[in-house]
Amino acid sequence: MRIDVPWGTGTTSVELDAERVTGVLGANVATADDPEEILRVAISRPESDMRSFLARAASPLVVVVNDATRPTPSADVLRVLRADLEEWLEPPGRELAFVIATGTHRAALPEEIDRIFGKEFVDAHAGRIFSHDSKDKTRLVHLGPTKRGVQVWVNRLLADARSVLLINSVEPHYFAGYTGGRKSLFPGLAGYETVWANHSLSMEAGSELLALSGNPVHEDLQDELALGVRGKSVYSIQLVLDKDHRVGFAAAGGLDDTFGRAVAVADKQFVLEIDRRVDLVVAVAPHPMDCNLYQTNKAIQSGALAVSDGGILIVVSECPFGLGENQTLFDMLAAADSPAEALERAKRQEYILGVQQAARIATILERAEIWTVSTLRDEDVRAMFMTPYRDLQIAVDRALQQKGPEAQVLFLTEASITVPRVREDRQQDT
């Protein structure tokens, strides 16, 4: 049996006996018949008509899009919106800016900007396109504290805007519950200190996959959002993507409503019901969420939900940008003599951005092995108590040999955005 899985912008394959495969699971979604029509219908409904929003939108208007680590098809959306945005811009004195919500990531590279917006769009609006920089205090404005005492710093373009248009996509997130919605602005356009303080809440109970109610990270983000958009007119386009990362569902209008509707759809598409945990799980981080180890952690966290104690989790991620700019995950694991020591250090030390990732991976390593198929340096992988491979076939063959003739493999081909969940046993004990 041949199984093809994502690798970079292409695929890699593995051959194994069919009886050794317990499942090949991706998102519960097909290819959308007409993504553009789905979007056009959403933005033209009477209760959420985008042209009505633009007709009353005061200047400056800021359009916020995701960075290149997200699969959001912003260029496809902007192709539909472009004529209306340019018509809004025609009267003298109006200001329009397009801001890439990088959060604490680096600025978008030129080729990434072309991919995010589309080359033709960039050529027409290059002077209006900006990448957020969370550490540049000269481009940040302080808005005050949230209920939890998080000091909110935000990009000046958002602070000065009177109207805001958001384009985002919604998938499960390993400690904020779900991506999308409020994350366009916080952490997307927040200062580094604000992101640091909010993400420190991920060490508290309730900050889990699929959880919104009672999730301290999400609830604080909502408070940050309330400060960030106070007095502004906001129009939100929240997407759930099809299997080709195109528009599969679109909700347009108010931010809370669109986010809620997208979450409901995402829950049906990205939660994968499984009968049991298995000895061997192959968890794939598909492009562009395979860019570095920091982003690959999402696939690790998801795959761990399906692997049994004592099992092997094989993480497939090209990682062309290595460990990522934030190397706290690597540093904390590499500085320890064991996963248990890394976990203990994480609990003791003052929070730094990324420590939650190291702590969660250390917790997984306490009960299962993690093997990687990537381009990361072997010595770096071993320093994190993981086993490095370059070839998926070799990794799977050796894992099956190690786990024995009864072992089976579960393939999660989109582990960065899907969440395996063991079905509840409905049989009554007798």
Image (cartoon, rainbow, N blue to C red):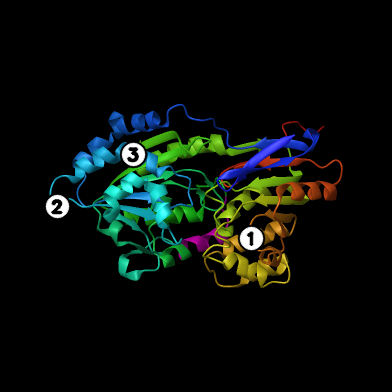
Magenta stretch: residue 201 in it? Answer: yes
* Camera-nearest label, 3 or 2: 3
Is 121 left or right of 390, judged from the image as shown? left
Disc 1 marks which amino acid?
Leu
User: In the rendered view, would you say 401 is above or below 55?
Assistant: below
User: In the rendered view, would you say 213 is above or below 145?
Assistant: above
**Residue 195, located in which quarter of the rendered image?**
bottom left
Disc 3 marks which amino acid?
Arg
Label 1–label 2 contact, CB within 8 A = no
Q: CA distance from mark 1 to mark 2?
A: 50 Å
Question: Which numbered disc covers residue 93?
Answer: 2
The range drawn in magenta is 197-208
Q: Where is residue 30 drawn, in percent x and y? A: 54, 30
Spot the residue most to the left. Answer: 92
User: Sequence-wise, which precedes: disc 3 or disc 2?
Assistant: 3
Magenta stretch: residue 402 in it? Answer: no
Determine the secondary structure under disc 2. loop
CA neighbours of label 2 inside 10 A, class few (<14), some (14 to 19), many (20+): few
Q: Where is residue 20 drawn, in percent x and y? A: 79, 37
Spot the residue most to the top. Answer: 33
Q: CA distance from mark 3 to mark 2?
A: 24 Å
Disc 2 marks which amino acid?
Gly
Q: Which residue is mark 3?
A: 79
**Residue in the picture at 34% in, 70% down:** 137
User: Sequence-wise, which precedes: disc 1 or disc 2?
Assistant: 2
Q: Which residue is mark 1?
A: 376
User: In the rendered view, would you say 94 is above or below 333?
Assistant: above
